[in-house]
Image (cartoon, grey):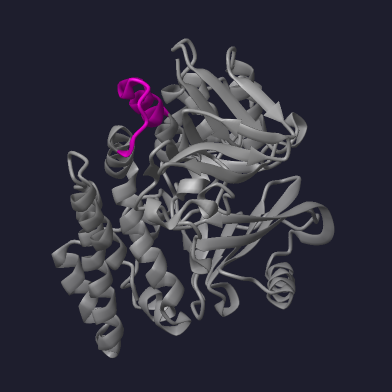
Amino acid sequence: MSKIIIAGAGIGGLILAKELEGKGHEVIILEKNTLAALSFDWHDDVECGIVPEFNIDLTKIRHYPKQDWAFIFPEVDDIIGLTIPDEKKDISIHRRDLSTWLIGELKEAEIQYGNAVKNVICKDGRVVGVKTNKGDIFGDLIVDCCGVDSAVRSNLPDEFGVLQKIKDEDVFNVYRGFYKRTDAKKEEFTNKAYLRHLGRPGISWALDKGDHVDVLVGNAGKITKSELTISLEHLKEVNDVLSDEIFSSAICRIPVRRPLEKMFANGYVALGDSACMTIPMLGSGIASSMRAGRILAKVIEESGGTFTEEKLYPYQERVNKLFGASHAAIDVLKCWLLNESASVLGFFVSKKIVVKEDMQAAAEGGVVKIGFGQIVKRAMRGLGNLSALMRLAKILSKQKKAQKLWSNPPAVYDVNKYQKWKEKAEKIFLK
């Protein structure tokens, strides 16, 4: 029997615990919060296919169908409104309800609330346990679900080859607030997302939910109080439904990069936000974390209780192929959107070089694909800025390269071969 320590009661970790039920393992979940304060007290989008895939009982969870989005680009008057078919629409699901339901499904796992993980314990080249506010806890495998700023991952020895600190530009610093709705008439577009809002390297949104307005302001990297204040004031100016009266608000940090190039070591794996499993363009990681949790459970069963890098490697390889490759391609596009000038983005939209179908693919968490014929046709509309057009062509080529590379990691683990693959994967994102 193996002792599995899950550091943090993230949704991916809860799925892992659920999948390991009845398999003879001792599973201990260490969670710093109480059950009542677990996860975020708001709705986030998740693929509708996740519900039957994981037999989720929606009667126990607050949810509603996701509304269509409208995108607003800098220096462009037109709003790009999307209409996603019902069968492809995400479900907005209450995160805390989902976590509570998953915990209620567990029969064997032990959950220790109020037990915060502070550091990692390593011995003889492997992770053997964690330090918590209640003492040291040891296990055969430590599953890191401590989030983007994980105290476990950030304290791993350099020689493990796992990225310890996520770059500032790969973390979305978010303010989210829920405001009283005014009695203003319902607008044509009820879900408005402002890309590169007021020139910032990030987005804002104002979502009319009927009885309240869901507001988000976020930057890739730091956001100042001044930027937040100015962005909120502008949202109120251009959204008549948004009042000054606030019900609640929160600040959080979300990873917005491809999954870690290496998320395993002897006795250790990263899962969920700790492994950066959110879709880089959307910041939604529920579906990918759940699927990764199921993959990890299968790998644990196949390992025979020996949690070496060689035995844990299939976890990385399968995650890469299932969604890591598409996330890497999306990350290429995200980096371009954040670093390209606002005027050029506006030029691309106004000249219909970037069109509604491209935004629809991005909104669905997919890879933007433009065929050769379409590239030529659109290029004719962009002759006024050839240098920007060349940069876009380079980005589309880099997307394909990233997706191909991430889809083909070494089939069998070899330290040297994997290191070469990892270096190639990281090089794609070097500026």
Residue 1 on the magenta span:
no
Judged by its main secondary structure, the magenta piece is helix
Residue 84, horizontal then vertical, whole percent: 43, 46
Q: Position of residue 298 (x, y in %)?
A: 35, 24
The answer to whether 391 is drawn above or below residue 96 in the figure is below
User: Is 18 drawn above or below residue 386 in the view shown?
Assistant: above
Magenta segment: does it hold 308? yes
Report the front residue among 220 and 265.
265
Residue at 31% x, 57% y: name it: 329
Quarter occupied by residue 191: bottom right
Residue 161 at least partly seen: no
Q: Where is residue 45 in the image (x, y as percent from the top left)?
A: 54, 42
Q: Is residue 123 left or right of residue 319?
A: right
Q: In which quarter of the image is the N terminus?
A: top left
The magenta span reads 294-309
Say above or below: 139 vs 95.
above
- Number of numbered discs: 0
